[in-house]
Amino acid sequence: MNAQAQQALAPAQLRLLSSFFATGVTAVLSGHGGERLGMTVNSFTSLSLDPPLVLFGAQSDSSVLQAIRTSGCFTVNVLAADQTDISSQLARRGGPEKMRGIDTVTAPCGAPRLTGALAWFECALDRCEAAGDHLIVIGHVLDGGCQKTACEPLLFFRSAYRALRAVD
């Protein structure tokens, strides 16, 4: 019997099981027509060092995804532990209004970048691949940077924000 013919795990059970995998929290930002758009993403990962590629998953109907496809560029911003408010604000559904009160600068590619992010990746859209109700967005990393001061990352585990703690 092939994998597709087997019964699939219920979405609620998959969500529960996935909550046991701790992730970092990022904000993916893009824009077009003078509007800044952003969304919270915890599916971000590096894909390749040569060429430098990263990826994340986005809902197919995402306004941020549409901006990325239109502009051809985006930034991935690794959130610091003190940026839970930004994560919560960008996790809501909506459009440019979600960016109200969030400070950004414009990256050289033209996409907005969060001020105060722990680290950031400036990316050109490489391609999108369909995967269920999401698209896998692959970006070619053009540039990036990180804060020089010590601060902790924002983590998500068991459906809640968490702090990093050193293990002895």
Image (tube, rainbow, N blue to C red):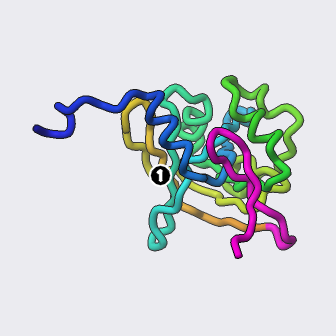
The single residue placed furthest to the front in the displayed view is: 168
Query: Where does label 1 land, which residue?
Result: 138
The single residue placed furthest to the left in the displayed view is: 1
In the image, residue 157 lies in the stretch drawn in magenta: yes
Quick one: quadrant of the C terminus? bottom right
Measuring from the top left, give residue 117's x and y in whole percent.
79, 56
- Three-letter code, disc 1: Ile
Measuring from the top left, give residue 23's x and y in whole percent.
60, 52
Q: Say if residue 34 shows up in the picture.
A: no
Give the image quarter of residue 85: top right
Identity of the residue drawn at 85% across and 40% down: 102
In the image, residue 104 lies in the stretch drawn in magenta: no
Give the image quarter of residue 36: top right
Task: In this rendered view, identify the residue nearer to me: 50 or 43.
Answer: 43
Measuring from the top left, give residue 12's x and y in whole percent.
47, 28
Q: In the displayed structure, does residue 79 sit left or right of residue 123? A: right
Residue range highlighted in magenta: 147-168
Q: Say if residue 69 shows up in the picture.
A: yes
Q: In the displayed structure, does residue 22 sit left or right of residue 79? A: left
Above or below: residue 91 compared with residue 47: above
Identity of the residue drawn at 69% across and 23% down: 94
